[in-house]
Image (spheres, rainbow, N blue to C red):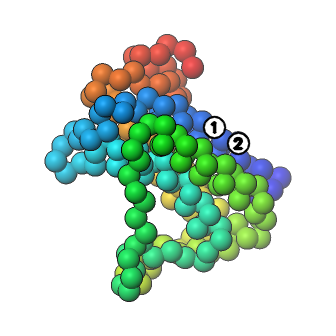
């Protein structure tokens, strides 16, 4: 079985669960923060909606520098609404899914590097980057978003099993 055939079911499952969580983001609470050091709900949800787009960087480039010493890092404008979050997320997921489906095993096994200020932070095969830096990273922030929802009395969706708000999936 090809690597893309093993990745796509997991990708589809996790992205569907992430979308369920983003669907709960309340427009009236976008600027809410649980702590002064924390991201706002808007910033966190925008980051989550953008994460699948990193798939294209991973597949189409050999590296990315998140804090280039020359020039500016790419900043994603914060979403203005839940609807905008979902539209961005859906586009990014569709683009990412297509890129994964079109990638060969040989290309997935080529190295990819994350840099900051020109310095290498890590180098891994692209397939490992997709599993850790994109999917696991997304899952981590989705859980964080679940806590933000709970703290705002927004029902948390069932993901891997029931929640206090939803008995069934």
> Considering depth in this image, is 66 or 83 the residue closer to the camera?
83
Is residue 136 visible to us here? Answer: no
Element at label 1: helix
Q: Which residue sits furthest top?
A: 167
Estimate how packed mark 2 is, as few (under 14), some (14 to 19) or many (20 or more) residues with alpha carbons within 10 Å. few
For numbered disc 2, what is the local secondary structure? Answer: helix
The quadrant of the image that shows the C terminus is top right
- Location of residue 116 (image quadrant): bottom left
Rendered location of residue 142, percent (x, y)? 44, 40
Question: Which residue sits at x=64%, y=46%?
Answer: 11
Residue in front for this viewpoint, 109 or 18: 18
Answer with the quarter of the image where residue 100 lies.
bottom right
Does any portion of residue 11 appear in the rendered image? yes
As drawn, 76 above or below 27? below
Whole-angstrom CA distance, mark 1 to mark 2, is 6 Å
Q: Can you say whether 31 is above or below 119 in the image?
A: above
- Using residue 99 as the reference point, say whether residue 63 is left or right of it: left
In the depicted view, which residue is nearer to us: 91 or 33? Answer: 91
Residue 142 - label = none
At 31% from the left and 31% from the top, the residue drawn is 28
The answer to whether 95 appears left or right of 70 in the picture is right
Any mark on residue 9, and which?
Answer: 2
Residue 18 spot, x, y in % from top left: 52, 38
Q: Residue at x 28, y 49 (%)?
A: 39
* Residue hosting label 1: 13
**Where 78 falls versus 63 (above or below)?**
above
| Residue in the image at 51% along x and 59% along y | 133
Q: Determine the residue located farthest toward the right in the rendered image.
A: 1
Q: Residues within 10 Å of mark 1 (few under 14, many from 20)?
A: few
Instruction: Give coordinates of residue 2: x percent, y percent.
Output: 81, 56
Pick the residue in front: 80 or 99.
Answer: 80
Tags 1 and 2 touching, CB below 8 Å: yes
């Amino acid at each position: 079985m090809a690597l893309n055939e093993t990745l796509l079911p997991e990708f589809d499952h996790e992205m569907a669960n992430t979308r369920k969580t983003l669907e709960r983001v309340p427009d009236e609470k976008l600027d809410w923060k649980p702590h002064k050091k924390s991201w706002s709900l808007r910033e966190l949800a925008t980051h989550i909606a953008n994460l699948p787009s990193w798939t294209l960087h991973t597949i189409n480039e050999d590296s990315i520098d998140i804090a280039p010493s020359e020039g500016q890092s790419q900043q994603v404008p914060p979403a203005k609404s839940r609807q905008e979050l979902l539209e961005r997320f859906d586009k990014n997921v569709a683009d990412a899914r297509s890129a994964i489906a079109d990638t060969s095993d040989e290309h997935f096994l080529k190295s990819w590097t994350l840099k900051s200020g020109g310095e290498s932070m890590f180098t891994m095969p692209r397939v490992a980057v997709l599993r850790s830096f994109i999917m696991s990273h997304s899952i981590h922030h989705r859980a964080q978003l679940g806590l933000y929802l709970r703290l705002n009395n927004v029902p948390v969706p069932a993901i891997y099993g029931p929640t206090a708000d939803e008995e069934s999936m």
